[in-house]
Structures are given as C-alpha cells and as structure tokens.
Image (cartoon, grey):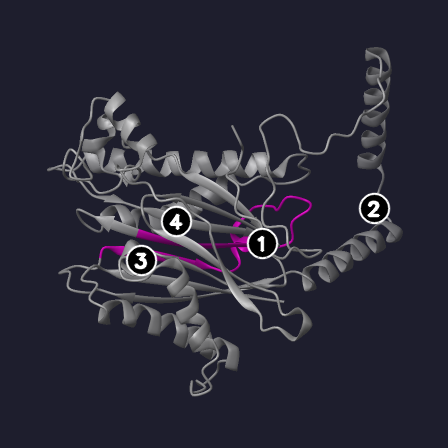
C-alpha cells in the first residue's frame, strides 16, 4: 500500500512541476545499488564513527567552530529565502444554524512551537479547519489540542526518511487527539456525543502534507500554460478525500463492524464515516484514521483552500478556485490599513467566498481558510 495517495500530474510538466511523489513503506521508485560490505567492516566503521564523535564532543569550541556554525546559519537563511511563504486568511459564517460548530487554526510559523526541527527543514506551517456536529465541543477540542500533540511528536534532528516519520506523526496525532476527546467526553454526565471532521495542512518548506477526516476538503490552485502568448489557465488539484458512508470501501468497513448505512448515513444518522469524537459510532466502524496526501509546491501554485462542507454544498472545487481568482484579479478591491495590496486581495477573496456560499443558500456553517503561496 502506498505511503501517501497520489495526486494527478500537471497537464504541462516543467522542471519544478512535480505534484506528488509515490512512496511505499519499503521501496523507493529510484533504487541505488550499494557495494556489499561485510559485517566485520560495518562494525569497524561504526567503532571509528563512535570514536570520532567522542573526540568532537570532548574538544572545546574554537573560534573556527563558531564561524562554521555562523556559515551554516547563513546557508539556511539563503535556502529559506528561496522557499514559498504561506499566509492564512479565514472567513466564518454561522449560516442558519443556532450555533457555530466550526473551528479553525492558523499557524503560519509552527516552528516556534517545536523543540527542534529536522535538520533538512527550515520552516513549518500549520492550518486546519474542523467542522463539528452534535455540538461544538469536539471541533473546539481538536482546534485547541491537535497541533500541540503534533508538536510533541514531531521528528527532529537527523532524519533519513522524513516522509515516513511525518506519516507516523500525523497518524499518531489524530489517534491521540481522538482518544483524549473520547476519554473526556465519556467522563461527563451525561456523556458528550459531539464529533468533528478535520482537514489539516502541514507545510515543511515547499512540501505540503494534508491529513483529513470526514467531508471537509482541501484544494490547490495551480497555474499552467502561458507559453507562446497563450493565457495561463488554472488547474484545480484535490488534496483530500471525502469520507462518506456511501463510498464503497467506507460502507464495507462499517458493515463488517456490525453497523449499517441507511439513506447515506451511518445507522441512518451520521453523515461521515471518519471523525474525531462520535464515541457512540466507533463500535460501528467510524474511525479516526486520516487520509494522507503529499504535494510538492511549485512557483506555479497560487493558493490552497481549506473549507468545511458548507462551502462545497454550493460550490464545486473548480468553481471555488475560479471565484477566488476573479477576486484576486479585481482591481476594485480597496486597500486596507496596515496590509499589503496582495494581502488585501486574499482577505477580500476569502470573505467574499464565504459570503457567496451563504448567499447561494447554504444553511450550514461555512468556514473557509485561504492559504496564499508566495515566493
């Protein structure tokens, strides 16, 4: 089974337009054949490395060592300047609901909350939207806790297979967040029955990981073409997978666990087949294991939309992308105090998209996070 689900390739490839890399748990697509080494040689090499480490640790730090550290920091700084900068904008509408059950998190720099970064990473960002049902407690709990659990489990130092470690970190984080909420929910009198979807975007430099449960979604806008005087066209890439009981694999899992799907819902009630919380449905095959997708950002990428199903009930993914692009290109957007022109346009696009969803008749809560991608 693949480590991460694949995303479609761009229609017009360029030197940096690779969307995703297919990984497996054991074998890489490109295999380098290494010369055979005997066990004795391996032991001798390991002993030499151990002695070298001991000598380095015991030596006092010299001015030359400090210069090397400064040089490394300068190299990191230069590398960081060539990486995409992600900024988040959010709009939330209650719709016709009595209560706002959505929650969201914008952390364009999660690095400050991590004890240490992997050696090959210079910046980490985190954005998430949670769509609650049966109450707002599960969504708020996930918004408050999930990124803290993620930070505590985040890999650091020298890492040989960062993708595999990130996958494990995300899977463990979702499971732990679900366990913690269910424990708290069951201790209440009466027990809480809230649940929540989750769509989380974790960006490590120019690599984006999306982990999602339920029917909230993430989509990427990529611009392609433009050669030979042609106008560049937007391509919409889905970065998440919806988990509905009507999906064959989801329905089969629920039925194997003893549950039923009636009128497109678990036991005729729950609209999603994966979630945080929903303790009363866990015995029926509702799980908290997220789908994971990885995307390599390119200079052709404009923005990512994270939104609950309230938006996508009245917008297709492609319509939402084109709506945002139309606002970004609108010359009538007024400049706000203290914001750059581009930030004003993204803020306006985010607010107008959420408002348009309500205007189109969405009675549900609507939360939209618009993540701009700048270089």
Disc 1 marks which residue? 10
Q: Earlier in the sequence, mark 2 or mark 1?
A: 1
What distance separates the C-alpha of mark 1 from that of mark 4? 23 Å
Indicate yes or no whether the magenta region holds residue 179.
no
As helix, strand or loop, the secondary structure at mark 2 comes to loop
Q: Earlier in the sequence, mark 2 or mark 4?
A: 2
Q: Are marks 4 and 3 in contact (CB under 8 Å)?
A: no
Q: Earlier in the sequence, mark 2 or mark 3?
A: 2
Q: Earlier in the sequence, mark 1 or mark 4?
A: 1
As helix, strand or loop, the secondary structure at mark 1 comes to loop
Residue 340 appears anywhere in the view: no
Pick the front one: 182 or 56: 182
Q: Are marks 2 and 1 in contact (CB under 8 Å)?
A: no
Disc 3 marks which residue? 312
Q: Which residues are magenta?
A: 101-130
Q: Indicate which label's residue lies in the foreground, 3 or 1.
A: 1
As drawn, the residue found furthest toward the right would be 64
Q: Is residue 305 left or right of residue 340?
A: left
Q: Residues within 10 Å of mark 3 (few under 14, many from 20)?
A: some
Where residue 90 sits in the image (x, y, percent)? 38, 66
Q: Residue at x 22, y 43 (%)?
A: 271
Disc 2 marks which residue? 61
What distance separates the C-alpha of mark 4 from that of mark 3? 14 Å
What distance separates the C-alpha of mark 2 from that of mark 3? 58 Å
Disc 4 marks which residue? 199
Residue 82 appears anywhere in the view: yes
Quadrant holding the C terminus: bottom right
Indicate yes or no whether the magenta region holds residue 116.
yes
């Amino acid at each position: 089974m693949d480590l991460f689900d694949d995303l479609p390739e761009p229609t017009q490839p360029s030197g940096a337009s690779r969307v995703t890399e297919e990984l497996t748990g054991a074998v890489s697509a490109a295999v380098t054949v290494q010369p055979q080494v005997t066990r004795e040689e391996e032991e001798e090499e390991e002993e030499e490395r151990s002695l070298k480490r001991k000598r380095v640790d015991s030596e006092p730090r010299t001015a030359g060592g400090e210069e090397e550290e400064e040089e490394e920091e300068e190299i990191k700084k230069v590398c960081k300047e060539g990486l995409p900068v992600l900024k988040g904008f959010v709009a939330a509408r209650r719709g016709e609901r009595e209560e706002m059950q959505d929650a969201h998190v914008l952390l364009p720099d999660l690095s400050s909350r991590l004890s240490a970064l992997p050696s090959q990473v210079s910046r980490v960002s985190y954005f998430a939207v949670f769509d609650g049902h049966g109450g707002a407690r599960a969504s708020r709990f996930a918004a408050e806790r999930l990124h803290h659990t993620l930070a505590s489990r985040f890999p650091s130092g020298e890492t040989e297979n960062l993708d595999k470690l990130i996958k494990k970190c995300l899977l463990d984080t979702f499971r732990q967040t679900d366990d913690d909420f269910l424990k708290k929910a069951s201790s209440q009198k009466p027990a809480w029955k809230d649940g929540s979807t989750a769509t989380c975007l974790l960006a490590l430099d120019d690599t984006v990981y999306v982990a999602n449960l339920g029917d909230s979604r993430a989509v990427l806008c990529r611009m392609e073409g433009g050669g030979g005087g042609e106008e560049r066209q937007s391509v919409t890439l889905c970065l998440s997978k919806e988990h509905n009981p009507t999906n064959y694999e989801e329905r089969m899992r629920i039925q194997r666990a003893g549950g039923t799907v009636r009128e497109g819902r678990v036991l005729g009630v729950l609209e999603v087949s994966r979630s945080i919380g929903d303790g009363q449905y866990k015995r029926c095959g509702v799980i908290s294991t997220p789908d994971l997708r990885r995307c390599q950002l390119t200079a052709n990428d404009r923005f990512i939309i994270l939104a609950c199903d309230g938006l996508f009930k009245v917008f297709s993914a492609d319509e939402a992308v084109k709506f945002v692009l139309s606002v970004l290109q609108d010359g009538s957007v007024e400049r706000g105090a203290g914001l750059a022109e581009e930030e004003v346009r993204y803020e306006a696009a985010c607010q107008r998209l959420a408002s348009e969803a309500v205007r189109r008749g969405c009675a549900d809560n609507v939360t939209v996070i618009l993540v701009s991608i700048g270089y």
